[in-house]
Amino acid sequence: MIRRLPPLRSLEAFIRVVRAGSAKTAAAELALSPSALSRRLGALEDFVGKPMFERKHQALKLTEEGQQLYDAVAPLIDEMADRVDRLIDTGKVMRLRLGVLPLFG
């Protein structure tokens, strides 16, 4: 049986907001607009069916459910990222070839 999982991008945004302490900082770190970040957080809340944050005057505070989700998924996401990093061959040299028109060359 395949279980549904929340969108990874939404989890990444959620974790980044919690760790950064602000949506504005998290959006900048993820190279997202504030509205795009808000949509990702909204998608996670829709998936879970509960609000993850209390929103008060531009401030975000984790709800009890938000804290439970963070405590459950953040270590797993960190572990997954670490394992992927280990699989990537960091010693591999990447080459970039550029084609330039004679006018600019």
Image (spheres, rainbow, N blue to C red):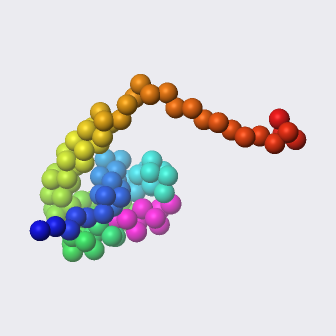
- Asked if 93 appears above or below 24 in the picture, the reply is above
Comparing 90 with 14, the one in front is 90
- Asked if 33 appears above or below 48 in the picture, the reply is above
Name the residue at 24% across, 59% down. 62
In the picture, which quadrant includes the N terminus?
Answer: bottom left
Can the viewer see residue 95 in this picture?
yes
* Left or right: 17 as drawn, with respect to 1: right
Snapshot quadrant of residue 40? bottom left
* Left or right: 96 as drawn, with respect to 31: right
Q: Residue furthest right?
A: 103
Locate residue 91, reporting x and y percent. Answer: 41, 25
Q: Residue furthest top?
A: 91
Q: How many marks?
A: 0
Can the viewer see residue 54 in this picture?
no
* Left or right: 55 as drawn, with respect to 3: right
Name the residue at 45% across, 47% down. 29
Locate residue 17, reporting x and y percent. Answer: 34, 53
Residue 102: in magenta span = no
Name the residue at 46% across, 64% down. 36
Locate residue 90, reporting x and y percent. Answer: 40, 29
**Secondary structure that dominates the magenta span:** helix
In the picture, which quadrant includes the C terminus?
Answer: top right
Comparing 41 with 7, the one in front is 7
Locate residue 83, reporting x and y percent. Answer: 25, 38
Residue 37: in magenta span = yes
Magenta residues span 33-41
* Left or right: 1 as drawn, with respect to 101: left
Comparing 6 with 95, the one in front is 95
Snapshot quadrant of residue 14? bottom left
- Asked if 97 appears above or below 11 in the picture, the reply is above
- Asked if 101 appears above or below 92 in the picture, the reply is below
